[in-house]
């Protein structure tokens, strides 16, 4: 038995190999390196690999370095080659746990199962950190990408405890919160909370492509919010949607039924007002279930709207003065005035803080409308 | 000829009557009152009317006050009674311009046309301030609601110049930017940039209503943004959608065609990856056309991500120090870490300011990931 090396966290990991040094692989490497883990990087592109090293994601793999095999291999390559790379790594590192971080788990598990023996398969545990960015590549990586985000780990009754521990330690070392779901539940969940919303945001944004510019010019914050993620990468998302086709189709098919009902109401075929109000009302109910920022229970905050000049330091002064008053900002919505040099800040605070905040801000000369 | 009263803006309006003292009517009243306009309030609910007065939206109408008839009547009642009230006001104030602020213009124009003589109709000009809130009632009103927002005015070749000027002055007095569109163009535009996005946000959020809580718990900022406006009022939106049924149906029907194409690709019936990538790519194009905050041309900002502690004053310190460095914050995205007491602030700045900002923040001890 070897003792943990001095200075390392009391976990099971000392050496981790990362295959694929894009946004996620490089971010994992940076986070692990900061925790004192020896990170070995590998990418099919020598340039990408060297860039990730230079950004602090780890060191390059050395040939013939068998004496110090990794306890864990993280496969962070595009979804369409993930299963093949997992199988290769299971064979190349016969004592290591192998995980991947692809957004869809069921299809990859099936593909790996077809490529390796059942005993070898036991060392594979799929996982999925619920984190990402609209930008890609190691250049967009950051060590805190996973901080406080759920990290889904897909296990079943055959998963060896040692292998599971390696993946749990990985999630914790990078600051994530391990969440256990089997592959099917995971895929159904992300279809609903991530993949279908991506499709709907993109389809809505596409309706602006050929719209008259005087129409688009009337857009407000609502449209900007609904379509923000429509800026995401088409090639990556095509792979994700394709890999989770059955589950995404299920959600979109449900949605199409509701859409047909709304279109039917607009056609005047049924009780229009009742149907339309029900559709918006059902959205109220669903929206209210989305977790607030601190964990899983939705928190209802009170809002205070403040007029702020659009010049350096105005928002800073606002938040400094909130801080001086001992009031924590829970969320912030900036509403900009088109063509004007000022805007409205809608700050969310705990309900009990609303009255004191308004009083405090007015006393300091801020414009706080009723 | 009378001279403008001392202290009043050099416009055409001195007395304005507002019928309907909900969110919009009361907000208009507050803004006009601040500009020194004599505002007369009227609402079918004595309580609502008194509340708006107490909030500073104007004074209550007095009986037999014909000597000082308003130059302009603003009808701000629910869409289903708007036309009837417009007709009544046109008859009651035979020299006044009458406008309304309902979200849909074509149907109301048709309804008013059926209720009044053509000569009387000339004094009616529909308008629509592109502003609102998820909350309703005078209690949510604010004088700056329209500041910097487009205010659509629907005119045709028969619109008398004097009446048009009254409505333009109204829009300017409350801080809005007058935009001229005919009723049909307006209705087509808002169907696309407001009404259809509302439906899609609501339908997407409704898919979370019966979802397992462990699925909803994985939600991130993308889902929160897509579904934010799904919190809107069902009864009001049912009326808006119903009043603009033809145009909203057109947009939703286009969207359904795209949705069918995506579902078909997910069914494996066609070249899936190509179809899916095209759908996401079309969304990229549409999203890029949405105006940035300062006017109608989309502005591309550079972003800098900063780790901020979730305690009073941290964001304030960040923005104060940005201000000290002379760098203006153009936009802000807060990404909260679930269950953690810190978050990431993604600040948008003009591209030229990005490098200096990173240097400045790091010099001051902020964590700014690569």
Image: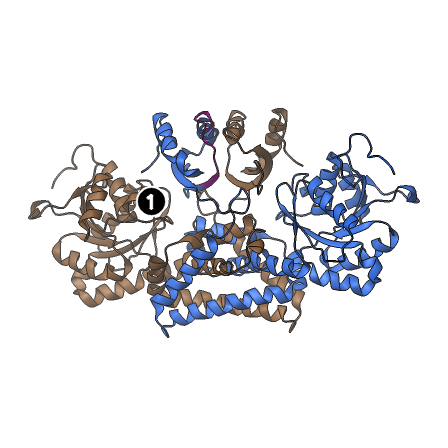
Chain colours: A blue, B brown
Residue B206 inside the magenta-drawn segment? no
User: Is A329 part of what is drawn in magenta?
Assistant: yes
Left or right of B147, for residue B288: right
| Residue B156 visible in the shown view | no
Q: State how many labels appear.
A: 1
Left or right: where A141 falls relative to A195? right
Front position in the image: A133 or B4: A133
| Magenta stretch bounds | A323-333
Closer to us: B238 or B71:
B238
Q: Position of residue B232 (x, y in %)?
A: 39, 54
Q: Nearer the viewer, residue A329 or B174?
A: A329
Q: Residue furthest right?
A: A64
Does residue A125 show up?
Answer: yes
- Mark 1 falls on what kind of element? loop
Q: Residue at (7%, 45%) from the top-left corner? A: B67
Up-down: is A316 above or below B271? above
Q: How many residues crowd around disc 1 within 10 Å: few (fewer than 14), some, or many (20 or more)?
A: many
Q: Chain of mark 1?
A: B
Residue occupying the point 63% across, 40% down:
A147
Quarter that holds the C terminus of chain B: top right
Q: Residue at x 17, y 49 (%)?
A: B46
Quadrant the N terminus of chain B occupies: top left
Identify residue for label 1: B176
Residue A83 is drawn in which quadrant? Answer: bottom right
Q: Where residue A239 sits: x, y (%)? A: 68, 60
Whole-percent x and y of residue A193? 56, 56
| Looking at the image, residue B45 lies above or below residue A67 | below
Spot occupied by residue B120 in the image (x, y as percentages of width and height)? 16, 60
């Amino acid at each position: 038995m070897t003792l943990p090396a001095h200075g390392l966290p009391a976990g099971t990991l000392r050496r981790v190999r990362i295959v694929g040094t894009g946004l996620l692989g490089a971010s994992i490497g940076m986070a692990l390196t900061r925790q004192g883990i020896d990170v070995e990087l590998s990418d099919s592109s020598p340039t990408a690999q060297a860039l990730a090293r230079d950004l602090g994601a780890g060191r390059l793999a050395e040939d013939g370095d068998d004496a110090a095999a990794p306890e864990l291999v993280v496969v962070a390559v595009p979804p369409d080659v993930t299963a093949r790379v997992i199988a290769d790594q299971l064979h190349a590192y016969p004592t290591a746990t192998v995980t991947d971080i692809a957004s869809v788990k069921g299809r990859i598990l099936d593909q790996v199962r077809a490529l390796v023996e059942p005993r070898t398969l036991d060392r594979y545990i799929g996982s999925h950190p619920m984190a990402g960015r609209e930008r890609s590549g190691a250049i967009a990586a950051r060590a805190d990408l996973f901080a406080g985000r759920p990290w889904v780990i897909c296990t079943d009754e055959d998963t060896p405890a040692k292998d599971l521990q390696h993946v749990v330690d990985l999630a914790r070392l990078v600051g994530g919160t391990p969440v256990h779901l089997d592959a099917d539940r995971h895929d159904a969940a992300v279809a609903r909370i991530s993949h279908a919303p991506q499709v709907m945001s993109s389809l809505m944004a596409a309706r602006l492509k050929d719209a008259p510019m005087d129409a688009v010019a009337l857009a407000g914050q609502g449209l900007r919010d609904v379509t923000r993620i429509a800026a995401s990468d088409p090639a990556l998302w095509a792979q994700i949607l394709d890999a989770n086709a059955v589950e995404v189709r299920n959600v979109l098919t449900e949605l199409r039924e509701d859409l047909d009902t709304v279109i039917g109401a607009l056609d005047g075929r049924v009780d229009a007002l009742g149907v339309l109000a029900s559709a918006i009302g059902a959205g109220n109910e669903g929206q209210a279930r989305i977790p607030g920022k601190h964990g899983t229970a939705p928190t209802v905050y009170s809002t205070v709207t403040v007029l702020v000049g659009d010049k350096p330091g105005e928002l800073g002064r606002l938040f400094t003065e909130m801080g001086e008053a001992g009031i924590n900002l829970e969320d912030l919505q900036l509403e900009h005035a088109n063509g004007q040099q000022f805007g409205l800040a809608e700050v969310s605070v705990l309900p009990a803080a609303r009255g004191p905040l308004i009083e405090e801000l007015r006393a300091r000369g801020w414009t706080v409308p009723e």
